[in-house]
Image (cartoon, rainbow, N blue to C red):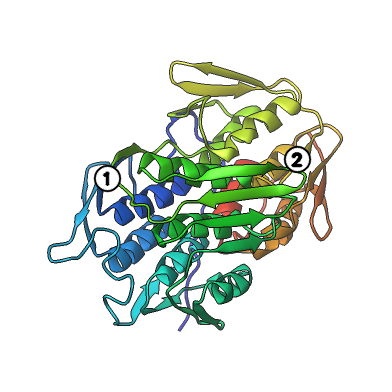
Amino acid sequence: MSCEIPEKIISRFPEGTITPPPSKSLSHRAVICAALAGGGRVENFAGSDDVDATLAGMNALAEIETRVDGDALTVSKRVGAAVPGRPRFNGMNPDRLTIDCGESGSTLRFLLPIAAVGGSDTVFTGRGRLLHRPLDAYVKVFAKGGAIFERDSERAVVKGPLKSGSYSLSGNVSSQFVSGLLFALPLTDGDSEIRVSAPIESKQYVDMTTGVMAAFGVRTDTGGDTEAGLIYRVPGGQRYRPARFRVEADFSQAAFFLVAAAIGADVRVAGLSPDSVQGDKVILDALRAAGAAVNWSGGGVSVSARRLSAITFDARNAPDLVPPAAVLCCFCDGVSRIVNAGRLRLKESDRLSALTSELKKLGAEVEETDDSLSITGAERLKGGSVDAWADHRIAMAMAVAA
């Protein structure tokens, strides 16, 4: 049986004002906290495959009911459920659960520790490369906390309960492991701490997690410094409390349109805030470093540039920005570098190889190492046929490059 791959021909980038969809990063976190609270309202909510996977998983774990009215998600306790947010914990429901994470790494890594706080078996499945992506950081954590964790190429299985304690994680693994533990440990009876060694990657995503948790009434404390690492102290016996939370527009998706504006498209991005908590707001710093002007007005941002200069973009704390940043570099005078990007080989595709391969098809000069790209700028690229590598961020990057 053959499958015809759809193609999209792009001759000119769209013009006008766009509002990016709600931030997926914030949406995942708000859904989890509202579910653990057994109630809440998430405004400016929009479903997606990844966020829907998290919502379905939390429906199963926390026995909640959800309703979407327009752009608002309302979460309530399921009729007949026990304590909101904790009905399946402490062996109260011994049945084995199965949670399909689709291709969402956030869903898998966030929900594994939440499931482990309970006493029943939970099986996590997924599609594509999901179960091939790193999970080793949880092996020692779960073993130390008294939980059983097994995995293969088709599933991951966890059986709790995960207990309070002192846990250590390497700072160069995905911040999703830290966030997953932060969600779960307040539900244990005792106090815990998470020690994250330096250098710490994507810390702003952990800050996003603690910020959303705080909005739902859960406290964490941070100590240490960036040279020695960080310690997250998590008091036990806490309860998430229902709250109203509004999701910001997504900076990681806005980045593609902002880059398009910098290289000549007449496009303005609405719905963003200069005070955003999102780490991917650093795309604005990259644009300014390249010589672009960034202007905020009327609840939106516009970008323009007469000439762009080579930059060095550090991907350690903003890996999702590498695809649009790579396109930006194609139009910067001189040789630009994207560094500390090795983790991109473990995303939905090997994004470093994908960007190198596909940008070259459009006439870009790109050199690839294990964890970096060097890109020599040009006045313009050429037309061509490119492959998205079954990865939405590669497809979006190629659309902007076109």
79 or 82: which is nearer to us? 82
Q: Position of residue 111 (x, y in %)?
A: 44, 64
Q: Is residue 398 visible?
A: no
Q: Residues within 10 Å of mark 2 (few under 14, many from 20)?
A: many
Q: Quadrant of the N terminus?
A: bottom left
* Relative image position of residue 145 (x, y in whole percent): 53, 72
Tell me which label, 1 or 2, sits earlier in the chain.
1
Q: Are marks 1 and 2 in contact (CB under 8 Å)?
A: no
For the residue carrying disc 1, how many other residues have a C-alpha within 10 Å: few (<14), some (14-19), or many (20+)?
A: many
User: Which residue is found at the position 70% from the left and 54% from the top?
Assistant: 355
Residue at disc 1, secondary structure: loop
Q: Position of residue 37 (x, y in %)?
A: 29, 52
Disc 2 target residue: 313
Q: Indicate whether 121 appears above or below 13.
A: below
> On the rendered structure, is 170 left or right of 143?
right
Q: Is residue 180 above or below residue 89?
A: above
Judge whether 111 appears above or below 339 on screen.
below
Q: Rounded to the nearest whole Å, what is the CA distance between mark 1 and mark 2? A: 39 Å
Q: Amino acid at mark 2?
A: Phe
The amino acid type of the residue labelled 1 equals Pro
Q: Residue at x 77, y 44 (%)?
A: 227
Quadrant (top left, top right, bottom left, bottom right) of the C terminus: top right
In front here: 374 or 333?
374
**Quadrant in the rendering for residue 225:** top right
| Kind of element beneath mark 2 | strand
- Residue bearing mark 1: 242
**Relative to 318, residue 6 above or below:** below
